[in-house]
Amino acid sequence: MPTSSKLRAIIEQTVAGFDASAMRDDQLFRDAGIDSLDHLNVLLAVEEQFGIEIPDEDSKSLNTLNALLAYLAAH
Amino acid sequence: MTQPSDPKLMPPSSPREGTSRVGIRAVSVYRPPTTIDNLEQGARLEADSAFITHKIGMLALTRKSAAEDTSDLAVAAVEKLVSEHGLPLAELDCLVLVTQNPDRAGLPHSSAIIHKKLELAPRCAVFDIGLGCSGYVQGLSVIQAWMSAQGFAHGVLVTADPYSKIIDPTDRDTALLFGDGASATWIAHDCEWHLGATDFGTQSAQCDALTRDASGHLSMNGRAVFNFAATQVPASIERLLAKAQCSLDTIDYVLLHQGSRYIVETLAKRIGAGERAIFAAGAYGNTVSSSIPMLLAENTPASAKRLLLCGFGVGLSWASCILDRAERLRP
């Protein structure tokens, strides 16, 4: 079951030196310091962790924890 | 049957006794002296300087002159192989060029143009291989097998793929990555490195992820290429090590295609190579099929005995291999 804390753990495992504990669930990744390459890496880690494929057309909008959680709940 | 009277048409010399395997004897590289300041370019393209420095990792990108074509970069690399390592041009049996940006749209093949510029012997056979970032490792396998089958004694594998010919300077996704350069690898019996196990493959469902668009410019789906590399490279390396019946612990250095600092670091983490995976392209950029031979020539310590090479990219394709120092294989 995807949760905010699981996603934060994935982000911390993926983005070197990043502390995800202070992120708000509605905060844009780029505002939290997750750049475009890290964003790709996080999405790949989410795909691998939850066994899903995120099409390119959906990927750009998955840029907050809330958006990712909603997507995972729907897929 | 009459024998040819022209000495340049005489068959190649026989392989030395007891050394039937050809391998890498020496590698030379050529990079044009002109570079682009990538931070300045990035500022024009509104790219963050910290991102360029720490993620892309390329602070300068080499650029050929307008007067240079692919064959000129290749010739320069081969000439360095002559001056630095004594490559005997007159004795060359073959020359194979890896490029996807040939002179004159590929007709004639650029290796023939190189043959002319270097005044190679008529009996020296040449051809081009149309591969990108996986091209060096695949090219090594091809030239080694061909030379072994034909009894050739001296061959050169050249990589020269100047992407400046096709880059859209306004495309932030591609303009900040690629540099021009070439390499030349002398393949011979008295060699320094032997080619070991290999693993090749193609994920053609995503062949459009790296292509040329309608205007002829390079077009890249960064996400597709990243995901491909992050998943297929570790899988290839796992298969390679199983085939070679060895563990990553036995590998001294991992020479990955220098797509960017970020992809090298991501792959190093995923395969557990740590600092053995070298990133060294910061001063010249992603030179496509020349990136791995540049590492081999310039960044591989003399103490290294076993290397793992992996090129990946256009196709989307991958090619991995193990190189063993020749002395390691002596009884």
Image: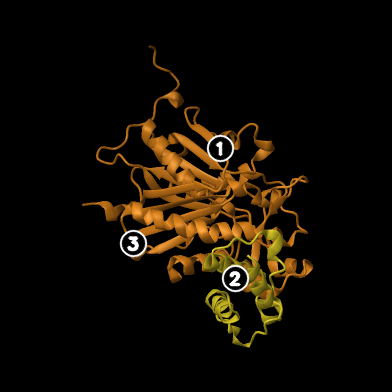
Chain colours: A yellow, B orange
Q: Is residue B29 left or right of residue B71?
A: left
Above or below, comparing residue B247 to residue A32 in the picture: above
Q: How far apart, in angstroms, are the residues tagged by discs 2 and 3?
A: 28 Å
The residue located at (24%, 40%) in the rendering is B18
Pointer 3: what residue? B247
Marking on residue A42: 2
Pointer 1: what residue? B128
Q: Residue A5 lies in what quarter of the image? A: bottom right
Amino acid beneath label 3: Ser
Q: Are marks 1 and 3 in contact (CB under 8 Å)?
A: no
Q: Dot 1 surroundings within 10 Å: few (below 14), some, or many (20 or more)?
A: many
Taking depth in this image into account, of B115 and B290 the one nearest to the observer is B290
Task: Tell me the subunit letter for badge 1.
Answer: B
Above or below, comparing residue B128 to residue B222 in the picture: above
Q: Dot 3 surroundings within 10 Å: few (below 14), some, or many (20 or more)?
A: few
Q: Secondary structure at mark 3?
A: loop
Taking depth in this image into account, of B260 and A34 the one nearest to the observer is A34
Amino acid beneath label 1: Asp
Above or below, comparing residue B314 to residue B251 in the picture: above
The residue located at (57%, 37%) in the rendering is B111
Taking depth in this image into account, of B106 and B254 the one nearest to the observer is B254
